[in-house]
């Protein structure tokens, strides 16, 4: 119970910045948040990449290296700033790994990775599987291909570490993120539906035969 309360408080604290990062500025961001979070039947796309099908590019092709960053580095950057909630997931689940692209000392893109045993919202992961989640690029750094570059680099690292399958779940209306994941080498596996905050968790490994569905 303490863990749940702490997560909710952290989400509320960074709510304005989170909504601006996802829905844009102005009062409309709150309307969209209420609609998608409570009222709407939403569709989320499970994206997928496998070690056997992944073609790794050479590291020198990446203009902006994506590296795993430690809690101390992230804490120093967050100090005194108002950032989207994606920057605080180490406070909610310490077992997740943080990857970021840094420009001019600013982690301008960030995403998190977890494997089997961590309770994600949508997926039940098995052996050799991982999920990339909580992906965000700060608005002022968008349009540079940071998301696709960073996700591809993280995929390459996870596959080198022995992971066999990597997933990511994105809202079906988030065209920019879907394009970035596709450019990074991920393909559509299946669609899951939610009613506001309610959904059924699935085992994505059991749906390989439904790729593209």
Image (tube, grey):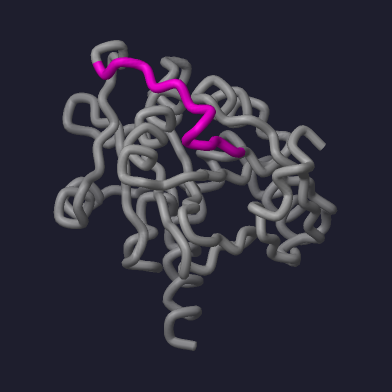
Q: Which residue is located at x 79 percent, y 49 percent? A: 42
Q: Is residue 138 visible?
A: no
Q: Is residue 169 left or right of residue 132?
A: right
**Residue at 55% of width from left, 60% of height from top?**
125
Q: Main secondary structure of the magenta part?
A: loop
What x and y, as percent, mark residue 134?
48, 48
Q: Nearer the viewer, residue 76 or 82?
A: 76
**Camera-side residue: 5 or 82?**
5
Please tell me whether residue 37 belongs to the stretch shown in magenta.
no
When the figure is inspected, residue 6 is found, relative to residue 128, above or below; the finding is below
Does the magenta run of residues contain 56? yes
Answer whether residue 149 is visible to the viewer in this image.
yes
Residue 130 horizontal/vertical position (percent):
47, 51
| Quadrant in the picture for the C terminus | top right
- Say which residue appears at 71% left-offset and 57% top-offset: 37
Query: Which quadrant of the figure has residue 64?
Result: top left
Front-most of residues 181 and 22: 181
Residue 72 x/y as whole percent:
15, 55
The magenta segment? 48-59
Of 67 and 144, the residue lying toward us: 67
């Amino acid at each position: 119970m303490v863990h749940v309360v702490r997560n909710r408080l952290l989400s509320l604290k960074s709510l304005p910045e989170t909504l601006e990062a996802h829905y844009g500025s102005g009062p409309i961001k709150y309307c969209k948040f209420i609609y998608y979070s409570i009222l709407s039947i939403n569709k989320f796309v499970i994206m997928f990449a496998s070690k056997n099908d992944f073609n790794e590019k050479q590291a020198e092709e990446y203009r902006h290296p994506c590296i795993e960053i430690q809690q101390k580095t992230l804490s120093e950057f967050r100090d005194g700033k108002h950032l989207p909630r994606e920057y605080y997931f180490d406070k909610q689940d310490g077992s997740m790994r943080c990857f970021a692209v840094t420009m001019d000392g600013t982690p301008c893109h960030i995403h998190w990775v977890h494997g089997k045993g961590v309770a994600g919202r949508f997926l039940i992961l098995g052996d050799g599987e991982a999920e990339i989640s909580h992906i965000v690029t700060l608005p002022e750094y968008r349009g540079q291909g940071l998301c696709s570059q960073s996700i591809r680099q993280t995929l390459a690292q996870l596959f080198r570490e022995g992971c066999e399958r990597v997933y990511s779940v994105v809202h079906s209306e988030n065209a920019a993120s879907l394009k970035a994941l596709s450019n990074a080498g991920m393909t559509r596996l299946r669609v899951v539906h939610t009613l506001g905050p309610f959904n059924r968790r699935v085992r994505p490994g059991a749906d390989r035969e439904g790729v593209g569905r």
